[in-house]
Amino acid sequence: MAERTYRIHIAAELAGVRVELIRAWERRYGVLNPRRTPAGYRVYTDRDVAVLKQLKKLTDEGVAISEAAKLLPQLMAGLDAEAAARGGRPDARTHAETWRESLLAAAQAYDQPRVSDVLDEVLAALPPLKAFDDVLAPLLCDVGEHWAAGALTVAQEHLVSQMVRARLVGLLHAAPQGRHRHGVLACFPEEEHEMGLLGAALRLRHLGVRVTLLGQRVPAEDLGRAVAALRPDFVGLSAVASRSASAFEDTLTRVKQALPQGMPLWVGGAAARSHQDVCERLSAHVFQGEADWDRLAGA
């Protein structure tokens, strides 16, 4: 895998140093010599970020930057020794948390270009599934929790979710198409939350499953017609929005009646987990975790 790199504003956030200060240190003291992309942008490695953190620590302690810069050979030797002791692996969890914090801060500032830039950094640094699992999916949970707590407005929540959705659609377009098994994925009738469904489609395609994605608010009768025409190996539904047990059972019953007899049906999402007993009574599998991905892929 290629070495992870960051644009200057992300490196600045990771190191806790202002962008202007990084540029001044480079210009006056030759602190770093970042690579440049074909478009001319500076890009910084994890090692560069670690150097910046060390320099910031020294200057915070009162060491002049001119003196701290003279210590660079020793600082870099120490960082290289630490990296070797760790097997050269950066703390990916810490980076994921920093990215999510940056995205939330950008949402609170109504800064959609910044949201876009940070998401691009994530997708450039991580493989698609890891980007979804470590950053995008937890970010959407964080955004939902902040909105529920009144810390984000609806506009701020939409500002992030629309950008995440666009990136997920792009990842799906680039994902393998799959060949051996076929799944039809849709949201419950009246269900508007589709991020989990997009994530499921992405994972299944990377597992070699061919996916037909129908998206939000699919009426039971229309789903039934599509499944009858496509004849997939299974149907997957996303049910997120909270509803009563009776309303959930009524909807799931209509879906089951619309599908060809014997068609395997899987249901995932918060509402499905809340009404697992209803799903089991109607012979619908509730998606539980990692082992179910293998079952859906036919492993």
Image: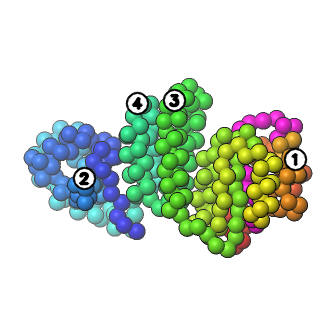
Within 10 Å of the Cα at label 1, are there few (<14), some (14-19), or many (20+) other Cα atoms? some
Q: Which residues are magenta?
A: 232-248
The numbered mark, 3 or 4, whose residue comes first in the sequence reads 4
Residue occupying the point 77% across, 65% down: 231
Q: CA distance from mark 2 to mark 4?
A: 24 Å
Q: Looking at the rendering, in which quadrant would you find the C terminus?
A: bottom right
Residue under label 4: 109
Q: CA distance from mark 3 to mark 4?
A: 11 Å
Circles 3 and 4, Cβ within 8 Å, touching? The answer is: no
Q: Position of residue 167 (x, y in %)?
A: 49, 50
- Amino acid type at circle 2 is Tyr
- Amino acid type at circle 3 is Ala
* Camera-nearest residue between 224 and 207: 224
Q: CA distance from mark 1 to mark 4?
A: 44 Å
- Amino acid type at circle 4 is Ala
Q: CA distance from mark 3 to mark 1?
A: 35 Å
Residue under label 1: 253
The numbered mark, 2 or 4, whose residue comes first in the sequence reads 2
Say whether residue 140 is left or right of residue 4: right
Which SS class for mark 2?
loop
Residue under label 2: 41
Within 10 Å of the Cα at label 2, are there few (<14), some (14-19), or many (20+) other Cα atoms? few
Q: Position of residue 296 (x, y in %)?
A: 71, 65
Q: CA distance from mark 1 to mark 2?
A: 55 Å
Residue under label 3: 155
Q: Looking at the rendering, in which quadrant would you find the N terminus?
A: bottom left
Residue occupying the point 73% across, 56% down: 236
The numbered mark, 3 or 2, whose residue comes first in the sequence reads 2
* Camera-nearest residue between 219 and 29: 219
Which SS class for mark 3?
helix
Quadrant of residue 209 within the rendered picture:
bottom right
Residue occupying the point 34% across, 64% down: 3
